[in-house]
Image: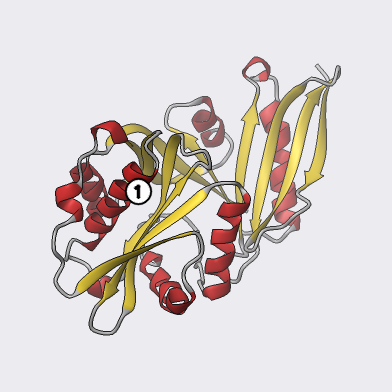
């Protein structure tokens, strides 16, 4: 079988990355697979690339994935990248493929889902947290909270990443705004719950949730985090519970909410369990050192 690898470029770079792509096709023009390489462009992560490879089941074990991988790795090297990361479901063909080609496992993840029809988080959402109050918004953060919210994003800095060479994500107001605008541009809905310190009005924690534009299917939790100096007060659980309760009210046709958590992040795994999330599968984050 003759394969053709066609390089492509995403015409619209994002606020913090740009993408390269390759399409593999057979000699008769039938698509056989694809690869996407996300090149992070912001300071703190400009050493990193993220890879996604997909091969049509009928074309597997014919060298398609290897050709796509070679093209992507060559591009990553030419772009001066130090590390390439890729994720695969545990036990899947992709898991075995990456392990056999020099990638090393650096992070284990648990994926979980909450069926909204069965969710009853009212009591958790209404638990008092003396010294704090919750606020929420849709889309872009309100101007009066923008700087404080951007500052609170450092709560993610010590998120367990185990051996991953993930670098440092530096948040400022333009990046926060750009992230919200990117969700809207995809036709999805971003909702954020934030914990505010009543002593000074500063944002000390947040929980983000993205819902499909039609309000159906499953929503996806993005980041949930609390600044280190405000942890141990139940804020993460209360924010996430408030987000779930609001989602049930605003999107009655939504079936469930999905989340993923590092296996080493015991506090967040405990939050998810308390809220009724059930594990669906495991995944492995792999890294190739260039």
Q: Residue at x 43, y 41 (%)?
A: 219
The answer to whether one can see residue 92 in this image is yes
Q: Percent position (x, y) of residue 147?
A: 46, 79
Q: Percent position (x, y) of residue 277?
A: 27, 38
Q: Percent position (x, y) of residue 169?
A: 50, 67
Q: Percent position (x, y) of residue 214?
A: 52, 38
Q: Residue furthest right?
A: 28
**The quarter of the displayed image where residue 70 is located:** top right
Q: Residue at x 66, y 56 (%)?
A: 39
Q: Residue at x 74, y 55 (%)?
A: 12
The residue to which callout 1 is attached is 262
Left or right of 77, for residue 165: left
Residue 241 or residue 9, whichever sits in front: 241
Q: Residues within 10 Å of mark 1 (few under 14, many from 20)?
A: many
Q: Residue at x 24, y 51 (%)?
A: 266
Residue 48 or residue 226, whichever sits in front: 226
Q: Residue furthest bottom?
A: 200
Reply above or below: 204 against 81.
Answer: below
The answer to whether one can see residue 265 in this image is no
Reply above or below: 97 against 193.
Answer: above
Residue 131 or residue 69, whichever sits in front: 131
Left or right of 81, for residue 172: left
Reply above or below: 13 against 72.
Answer: below
Residue 89 or residue 141, whichever sits in front: 141
- Quarter of the image that includes the N terminus: top right
Q: In the rendered picture of this protein, how many numbered marks are placed on residues?
A: 1
**What colour scheme has been applied to the protein in the rendered image?**
secondary structure
Which element is circle 1 on?
strand
């Amino acid at each position: 079988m003759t394969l053709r690898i066609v390089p492509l470029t995403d015409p619209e770079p994002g606020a913090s990355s740009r993408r390269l792509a390759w399409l593999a096709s057979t000699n008769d023009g039938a698509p056989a697979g694809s690869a996407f390489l996300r090149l992070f462009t912001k300071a703190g992560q400009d050493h990193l690339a993220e890879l996604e490879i997909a091969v049509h089941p009928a074309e597997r074990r014919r060298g398609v994935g290897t050709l796509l991988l070679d093209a992507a790795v060559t591009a990553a090297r030419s772009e001066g990248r130090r590390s390439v990361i890729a994720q695969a479901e545990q036990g899947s063909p992709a898991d075995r493929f990456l392990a056999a080609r020099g990638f090393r496992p650096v992070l284990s993840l648990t994926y979980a889902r909450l069926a909204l029809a069965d969710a009853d988080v009212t009591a958790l959402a209404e638990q008092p947290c003396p010294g704090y109050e919750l606020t929420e918004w849709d889309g872009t953060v309100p101007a009066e909270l923008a700087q404080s919210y951007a500052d609170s994003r450092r709560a993610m800095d010590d998120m367990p990443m185990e051996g991953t060479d993930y670098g440092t994500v530096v948040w400022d107001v333009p990046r926060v705004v750009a992230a919200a605008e990117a969700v809207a541009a995809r036709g999805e809905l971003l909702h954020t719950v934030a914990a505010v310190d009543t002593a000074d009005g500063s944002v000390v924690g947040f929980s983000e949730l993205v819902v499909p534009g039609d309000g159906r299917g499953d929503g996806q939790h993005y980041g949930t985090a609390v600044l280190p100096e405000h942890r141990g007060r139940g804020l993460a659980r209360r924010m996430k519970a408030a987000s779930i309760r609001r989602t049930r009210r605003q999107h009655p046709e939504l079936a469930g909410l999905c989340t993923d958590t590092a296996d080493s992040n015991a506090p967040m795994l405990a939050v998810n369990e308390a809220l009724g999330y059930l594990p669906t599968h495991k995944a492995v984050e792999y890294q190739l050192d260039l």
